[in-house]
Amino acid sequence: MTPENQTRKKVSVLIPCYNEHSVLPLLFARMNEFMNSMPSYDWEVVMVNDGSSDDSMLQIAQMNIRDKRWQYVNLSRNFGKEIAMMAGLDYVSGDCVVIMDADLQDPPELIPEMLRFWQEGYDDVYATRRSRGKESWLRRRLSLSYYSLLQRTTRIPVLQNAGDFRLLDRICIDALRRMREVQRYTKGLFTWIGFRKKEITFDRADRAAGQTHWNFWKLLALAIEGITSYTTIPLRISTVIGFITSFGAFIATIYFLLKTWLLGDPVQGFPTLVILILFFSGVILLSLGIMGEYIGRIFNESKGRPAYFVQEASLSLKS
Ligand code: UDP
Ligand code: MG
């Protein structure tokens, strides 16, 4: 980005949207007011409807008729937020994009600050939350320990408390568009691509309306996704554990052989046997499970399917 040059800049706002019936009217009002307050930019909001089963799509289409700044991509079914964002990045046409949640937990009022840093030459201005809004104590604790665990496995910085709320320059958009993996952990991709990054902080609001789409199991799945797409360390850990236990088994063998030969020990030690068998079966199953996670990823990626299908879109794919 060249700072402050003469041509008008186009800013795209990418909003994945899944069953946001109750929050959309608020979003439209707040975003329109916001965009009107910043007439020095050209605005485009790309709503990615991620297979909503309520009337979200209808509301979005009506907004598009009323105001051409509002565009949409309607996916053929629910693909999940990660894929919805990927689809959005394929369609946005701006010089930069701001990725934002539909539920107004990410305040649009932060965008001017992002734009300022962007104009100064940063390519990726991401917002980290100082507070996390209404969330259970357990979810917060789990989330924090998860990030510190993840960080210990990799050299690439893991951003704690950073959501997907960020501004990306066209250079980042094009980089992300080249990463076509289907099983995505977008947060990891943002850091992986690099470029000039700038952190800003904000207080995360509570959901303006409606309910979160995440439950414990979905979050657990995302967490495993994060680890297996970030690092292959678990594979190595299982190798090391395998090595240590084999070595232990070798020592134990010698010990028992000597004991039998030298002392003529009569057959005993049934409990020891049971414990050993249980322990080693556990270790073996765990290692198989870890390998399975990675093989599953290979399986899914090797099919080479398109990541999503589009029912209809009000704008065309950015070339
Ligand atoms: N979302 C989506 N597809 C999904 C689930 C969620 O596009 O399958 C969108 C949702 O509409 C919202 C954003 O992702 O704009 C974040 O979802 P949510 O607010 O439920 O997550 P949380 O803020 O609780 O992490
Ligand atoms: Mg939310």
Image (cartoon, rainbow, N blue to C red):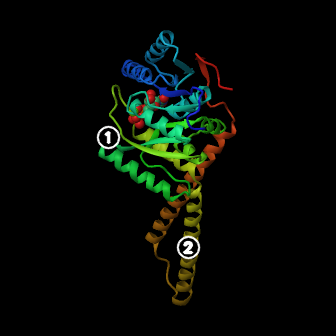
Label 1 within 8 A of ligand 1 by Cβ = no
- In the figure, 188 relative to 70: above or below? below
> Please, what secondary structure does the residue beneath circle 2 have?
helix
**Quarter the N terminus occupies:** top right
Q: Which is more toward the observer, 164 or 297?
A: 164
Instruction: Find the residue positioned furthest to the front.
Output: 6
Q: Which mark is residue 249?
A: 2
The residue depicted at 56 percent of the width and 32 percent of the height is 96
Q: In which quadrant of the rendered image does the C terminus lie?
A: top right
**1 or 2: mark nearer the eye:** 1
Q: Position of residue 180 (x, y in %)?
A: 65, 37
Q: Residue at x 51, y 89 (%)?
A: 263
Residue 173 rendering spot, x and y as whole percentages: 60, 35
- The residue beneath circle 1 is 135
In this rendered view, identify the residue nearer to me: 220 or 11: 11
Q: Can I make out residue 188 in this image?
A: yes
Badge 2 amino acid: Ala
Q: Position of residue 306 (x, y in %)?
A: 66, 30
The answer to whether residue 213 shows anywhere in this view is: no
Number of disc labels:
2
Q: In which quarter of the view is residue 184 placed?
A: top right
